[in-house]
Image (cartoon, coloured by chain):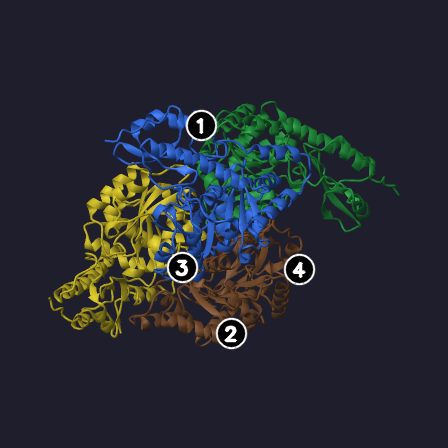
Chain colours: A yellow, B brown, C blue, D green
Amino acid sequence: MISFKNDYSEGAHPAILQALVDTNNKQQAGYGEDEYSLQAAQLIQQKMNNPRAAVHLVSGGTQANLVFISSVLRPYESVIAATSGHINVHETGAIEATGHKVETVECMDGKVTPADVASIVDVNDPIHMTLPRMVYISNSTELGTHYLKQELVALWNYCKSKNLYLYMDGARLASGLQAGDITFEDLALYTDAFYIGGTKNGALIGEAIVINNPALQENFAFHLKMRGALLAKGRLLGIQFIELFKEDRYMAIGAHMNNMAAILTAGIQQAGFSFFTTSTTNQIFPILPDTVIDTLREKYAFYTWKKLGNGSSAVRLVTSWATTEEMVQLFLNDLPVMTRS
Amino acid sequence: MISFKNDYSEGAHPAILQALVDTNNKQQAGYGEDEYSLQAAQLIQQKMNNPRAAVHLVSGGTQANLVFISSVLRPYESVIAATSGHINVHETGAIEATGHKVETVECMDGKVTPADVASIVDVNDPIHMTLPRMVYISNSTELGTHYLKQELVALWNYCKSKNLYLYMDGARLASGLQAGDITFEDLALYTDAFYIGGTKNGALIGEAIVINNPALQENFAFHLKMRGALLAKGRLLGIQFIELFKEDRYMAIGAHMNNMAAILTAGIQQAGFSFFTTSTTNQIFPILPDTVIDTLREKYAFYTWKKLGNGSSAVRLVTSWATTEEMVQLFLNDLPVMTRS
Amino acid sequence: MISFKNDYSEGAHPAILQALVDTNNKQQAGYGEDEYSLQAAQLIQQKMNNPRAAVHLVSGGTQANLVFISSVLRPYESVIAATSGHINVHETGAIEATGHKVETVECMDGKVTPADVASIVDVNDPIHMTLPRMVYISNSTELGTHYLKQELVALWNYCKSKNLYLYMDGARLASGLQAGDITFEDLALYTDAFYIGGTKNGALIGEAIVINNPALQENFAFHLKMRGALLAKGRLLGIQFIELFKEDRYMAIGAHMNNMAAILTAGIQQAGFSFFTTSTTNQIFPILPDTVIDTLREKYAFYTWKKLGNGSSAVRLVTSWATTEEMVQLFLNDLPVMTRS
Amino acid sequence: MISFKNDYSEGAHPAILQALVDTNNKQQAGYGEDEYSLQAAQLIQQKMNNPRAAVHLVSGGTQANLVFISSVLRPYESVIAATSGHINVHETGAIEATGHKVETVECMDGKVTPADVASIVDVNDPIHMTLPRMVYISNSTELGTHYLKQELVALWNYCKSKNLYLYMDGARLASGLQAGDITFEDLALYTDAFYIGGTKNGALIGEAIVINNPALQENFAFHLKMRGALLAKGRLLGIQFIELFKEDRYMAIGAHMNNMAAILTAGIQQAGFSFFTTSTTNQIFPILPDTVIDTLREKYAFYTWKKLGNGSSAVRLVTSWATTEEMVQLFLNDLPVMTRS
C-alpha cells in the first residue's frame, strides 16, 4: 500500500536524523534557550533579511495557530478566515477554545481577497459585534492553491488601512512559496507574522512561528508556556530547523513535493481526467469515477474530498519529501485511460 | 561545564534514536493512529495489567496536565494541589487559562495527605465556592520526595469517599517509582489517571497520559486536538515509548538516575553538608555555603533553590539518564570538606 | 420624538413597579432563594405543566444564553445557529468567549429547519471538528418571524435522533408565542431548555431560564455565580416574574405588542409599501424610499435594517408593551401614500 | 424574625423606587446610552473631581470584578489578592473562569500591604510563572476592616513602582469610606479603578465601575457586552445611581449602616463579649457562647463566621440602609449579660 493521504506519513529527512544523533550528548539549556534553537532563529532571520523577527519553535500547526492568535487578540476581538481555513474547519474549535470568534467568509479557491475581508469589516457594529482584528490566510491553501505576490501585497495594504493584522498559516509553506513568486523576504515585509511548517515539510515535528511586528513580540514566551507549547527539550526543534534552513533544504523539499505532484497532474490529465481545483502545489484534487477510485484504493491510500453525485468524486492526492518518482509512476500506471465520448 | 540543572539537558537514549532511524521510511497513519502509538499503548497497558486503560501520547508535561485536567472538570470545578505543585507554581497559570481554579494547600515535603485535602473540602461552601473535584499530586514531587504505597492508597480511599478524582503528574515517574514501593499495577488501581514522563526520563520529547477511569476516557482525543496537543506525526511519540517500555528500559533509567543522585548525596553528606529535604530520587537539595556555591559554579551548572539568609543556600542537583559516574565524581572532588566546629 | 427602535425604550409595566413598592421592606434571603423567586418559578412551572422544570432568573438575554450554553457543552462541543441568530451576530462573541464554536447555517427567514442542521451534522469529521451538540433557535426570530408547532416538533424530533439538545432564545417569546400556535406546555415537551424574556416584554430587567431536561439541571447555580449572573437581590427578578405570570399578563403584553405592530403593518400596506420579511410579531420590516425615511426620522426613531441600493431601504419598526395606538396612528398619518405607477 | 445576615435583605431606598416610577414612561436609548446613565456618570465624576473617569454601570459585584479584571489582564497575567479576598473565596472561580490566576497572600485583617505584595512579586520567575499585574483590595474588607488613606497611598506607590494596577472592590464602599479618612477624590488619585457598590448600599441592584486610568478605558463596553453585563435597559441602573449621588445619599446610607453597627458593638461590649476583628464598619464579628447563639437564632438571622472550638463562635452581624434602631435594641435586649468570673 502506497499512501498519498498526506505529507506526514513518513519520518524525517535523513539529514535531520543524522543531526539528532550527532548532537545527542551535548548538554543544553532548556525551554528554547539552547544553542540550536538560537541558531535556527538566526538562519530564519537571515533568510528573511529581518534580524528583528522573533522566532519561536513549537510542536504543531494547530498549536502555532492557537498560541499566536490568542496572544494577539484582546478578548472581544476576532479573526477573519475563509470558511475553508484550517482554523475554521479542522482544528476542533481551538481558536474559540481560547475565547475568540472566527469570522468567516466564503472564498474562491480558499484564498482571501480584500473584498472578502471588506464584506465583514464594512458591516461591523461596534460593541454588539466582535471587533475583527486579524486576517488569517494559509499558503498554500487547504485547496492546494497559492498566493501570488501581488495578491499578498494587496491584502496587506488593505489590512493596514483597516487596522487588521495579517497572519499566514504556513503548514505547507515550502510548497506554497515554491509554486508562486513570494519569497521569505516578502513574508517579512507583507505579513505581521506567519509560521513555517516543519511537520509537513520533512521534519519529525515542529513549526517555526515568526513574528515580524515588534508590537506582537512582547512576552510571547509566556503564552507558549501557558498553552503547553514550550518544550523542555527545545533542542529537538532547533536542530531540525537548522537542517532545514542551513542550506536551503526547506525550499528544495518544497520543489521536490511540487515536482512529484506535477508529474501526477500531468499523468492524470493525459489519462483524460479533470480537476476540482487548479493546483501547482503538493496537493491535487483530481475528479475520478467512483469505480476507478474503488480499484485504486486496493493499492493506494488517499482521501475522498467531495462526492460529486454523478458517479464521480474529487479525491485528494498529496506528495511529500519522501514521495518517489517510482511511487508516482506506479499510481499513473494503474490509472485507466478515459475514453472520451 | 557540566550541568546538574535538570534532567532534560541531553538528547535521547541511543536506543530511541536508533529506532527513529530504523522506522523512518515506513508510511504510517497520522494523529496517533500509527502502529507505533498503538503498540506503545499496549505495552503500557500490559505493564499496568490494565487492558482497559486509555493511553494518549503528547509532547510535554504542562500540556499533559492542562489537557487532562480541563477534560475532566466541569466549568465550576477546581483541582486541589500542594502549593509547591507544578501546576500551581511553574506552569504559568496553564490550568487557570482553561478556566479552572487550583485550590492550594501547604504540604510537608510537597506530598498531599488526606488531611490536607480535608482542610479544603471540609470548609467548602457550595455555589459560592468552586467545587473541588480532583486532587493533583506529583511523584516524585517537586521537592524530590516520593509517595509510598500506603500513602497513595490512603489518599485514593479518601478521594473516593469524597467524590474526588486522583491524578498523578509523573514528569519524574521513573525516579519516583524506583525510589519507593509503588508499581505500575498500583497506579492502575489507585489513580484515576496519571502521566508517564518521557522528556525527563530519556526520551527526546513526550509524555504518556494514562486514563484508568473509563468515565474519563470518552472523547479525549477531541480535547487533544482542540488544545493543539495531537501531533500529526504521532509516530515520533509512539516509537519512543515502545523503546522505553519494551524491555523495562523506563525503570532502568529511573534506577540509573537515582543511583547517580545517591552517590552525590553520600559524597555531600560525607563532606559534612546537610540537606534541605530528604530525597532518594534524582533531585537532591544540599545546603552549601554561598562561597562554595560560587566556586562550584565555575565548573558546574545548577539552580539555587532557596537562599537561607545565613550565608548558605539550598541548591538543586538533578541527575539524568546521561549522567555518568565520572561527572558525579568530578563534582564531589571539587567539593570542599567542611571542618566541623 | 417617538421611538420604534426597540421594545426596551420604556421602564416597566406599572403593576411591576407597584409590586416592588409593596414588597420593599420585607426581608428576604439572597441569591435567588427569596420567596418571590421561588413563587415565580412555581407560576412558570404551572404555566408549562412541568413541575420538574428548573427555573433560574437572570438579568439579561446575552447572559442567559452564555451561562446556559456554556453549562451544557463539553469543551469540544459546539452549538448550531442560524447566521442571523443573536448569539452569532449580536452578542460580541459571548459564546466563543466561554470557549465554544458557533456553527452557522444560512436560514430562510431566520428559522432553523432539520435540513439546515443536517447540512452541518452530516459532514462532521470527529476529533478534527467540534462536535455539534445543541441547536439554538430564537422565537420570535431576529427577522420577526416565528415558529409553528409542527416546525418545532419536527426540529425536536430531528435533534433527539442526532443526540442534539434544542434550546430556544425567548427574548421576544411573548410576541413569538402570541403570533403562532405554540404554547408554554409545548415548550416543556419540545425543548430541552428555553428562556422567557422579561426585558423586552414589560419587565424592568430579567429573563427566566427554564431547563426541562433534568440532565442539564444539576449544579446550574454554580454556573450562574461563576459567570456573575447570580444576583444578591434576586427578589428584584422574582417579583417581576410573579407579576408577569400570575394573571397571564405575559401573553397579554405579547398580544398588545403584536396588535400595535399589526395596525402599523396594515397602514403601511395600505399606503402602498411592501415588506422585507413577513412578520406578524412585534418587529416589522417595511421597505420605504430613502427620502421618506429621512422625513420620518424628524419625528420618529427607528433603525435602518438594510439599504437595498435602489433608493429604498428596509427599516425595522418595533412595538412594545408601552406603545399606544395614538403613537401608531401618528406614524401612519405621517406616511405618504405611494402613487402606483 | 429579624435578619442581620447581610445588607441586601431588603429592597431599595424609597427615593429610588419613586424615581423609577417618575421616569417610567420616558423613552430612552438602550445599552447604557440613556440620559440617566450619562447623568449618573457625571455625578460620580464630579464627586471624584475626575471628569476623565469612565463610569460603567453593571448589575452585580462578581460581574464587576470579572469583567474589569479580565478586561485589563493579558492572558498570562495574574491578580494578587488576600486569601480572604472576595474574588478568591466567594466568587466560584469567576476570575479563573476568564483564564487568570489569582495569586494569594495571607493578610492580617484582610488588608493587603506593600510587604504582602512584595512577597509574591519578589520571587516571580518570568515565563514559568504568571506575571502579576494587578492588586485587588476590598474596602471595607470581607472582615469588616477598612483602609486608611496612608495605607492606600503606600500601596498605590508600591504598585506604581512595580508596574502593578491597583483595583478596589467597593461592594461595601459607603461603609468603608465612612469609617475611614479616604474620600472619593482620593480614589481618583490612588486607584487605577474601583467599583461603587449599589446592591449593598440601598440600591435594588447595581454597581458602578469607575476606571481612572485612561489606558484601561478603551473599548471597555465590548467586554461588558461579551460577558453579558450590558443591560438593554441600562436606565434601571442610571436612575438609581442618580438617586444615590445627587444629594450625597450614598455616604448618608454608609453613615446610617455604620451607626447601627456601632450601637450593636457598644451594646455587645457592654454585655461583656469580645470581638473576632476590630470593625467600625457595618459588619461586626462578636464572639458569643454557642448556647447564646442558639437562643438568639430563634428571633434573629445571622451567619456563624467561625467556630472557635471552646464552646463559643464568632458570628457576623450586618446592618443595612433599612436597619432601624428598634431592630438593634431588640437584639441587644435579648442578649444576656456575661458574668465575669
In the image: residue D47, left or right of residue B32: right
Q: Nearer the viewer, mark 3 or mark 1?
A: 1
Q: Residue at x 65, y 58 (%)?
A: B118
Q: Nearer the viewer, mark 4 or mark 3?
A: 3
The amino acid sitting under disc 1 is Met
Residue C111 in the image, given as x and y percentages of width and height: 39, 48
Which numbered tag is attached to residue B115? 4
Q: Element at badge 1?
A: helix
CA distance for labels 4 and 3? 37 Å
The amino acid sitting under disc 4 is Ala
Report the residue marked by disc 3. Answer: B225
The amino acid sitting under disc 3 is Lys
Residue D101 in the image, given as x and y percentages of width and height: 52, 48
Which numbered tag is attached to residue B48? 2
Instruction: Tell me, yes or no, whether dots 1 and 2 are on the same chain.
Output: no
Q: Chain of mark 4?
A: B
Name which of mark 4 and mark 2 comes first in the sequence: 2
Give the quadrant of the C terminus of chain C.
Answer: top left
CA distance for labels 3 and 2? 26 Å
Residue A5 to residue C218: above or below: below
CA distance for labels 4 and 1? 70 Å
Name which of mark 3 and mark 2 comes first in the sequence: 2
Which numbered tag is attached to residue C327? 1
Instruction: Tell me, yes or no, whether dots 3 and 1 are on the same chain.
Output: no
Please report contact status of discs 3 and 1: CB closer than 8 Å, yes or no.
Answer: no
